[in-house]
Image (tube, grey):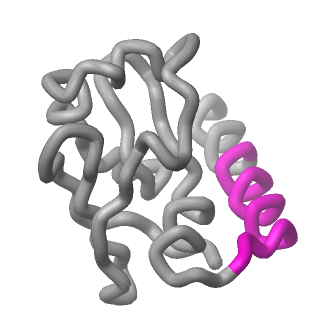
Amino acid sequence: MLKDIVEARAVKDHRVYIRFEDGVEGEIDLRKLITFEGVFQPLQNPAEVAKVRVEPDSGTVCWPNGADLDPDVLYAELTGKPVDLSDAVSRLTLQAHAGALSTKG
């Protein structure tokens, strides 16, 4: 898929509105996607969910504590289309390559 998120905001409780660059948009209920453990534990509190923001470098949503979600999973949740693992691998490869380039110089 390789679609970036361009807008995100907390809606209510554990729901987040997300809009992708291609116009796909909708609300995601985080309770259906994550277990509130580890890095996601703070998101049990809706006040923490409200701190959601878009990370432009990775094209996904994240929170101040470092928690983030794979945009391909979120896209699949909104569209009902399964995640294409070849796209996920491509995204990781591109991110790793971009990271390597940013450390050179």
The overriding secondary structure of the stretch rendered in magenta is helix
Residue at coordinates 36% horizontally, 75% vertically from top-left? 20
Could you tell me which residue is drawn at 44 percent across and 68 percent down?
Answer: 4
Where 36 falls versus 82 (above or below)? Answer: above
Quadrant assignment for the N terminus: bottom right
- 95 and 74: which is toward the camera: 74
Q: Quadrant of the C terminus?
A: top right
| Residue 93 part of the magenta segment | yes
Q: Position of residue 14 (x, y in %)?
A: 28, 40
Give the camera-side residue of 102 and 87: 87
Q: Is residue 28 left or right of residue 32?
A: left
Residue 84, image x and y in percent? 78, 74
When the figure is inspected, residue 23 is found, relative to residue 6, above or below; the finding is: below
Q: Which residue is found at the position 58% from the left and 51% from the top?
A: 70
Magenta segment includes 19: no
Whether residue 76 sits left or right of residue 40 in the image: it is right
Residue range highlighted in magenta:
82-96
- In the foreground, 64 or 81: 81
The spot of residue 65 in percent (x, y) is 37, 16
Circle count: 0
Q: Quadrant of residue 72?
A: bottom right
Q: Say which residue appears at 46% left-offset and 27% top-offset.
A: 67
**Residue 76 point in image, percent of width and height:** 59, 72
Q: Is residue 31 left or right of residue 26?
A: right
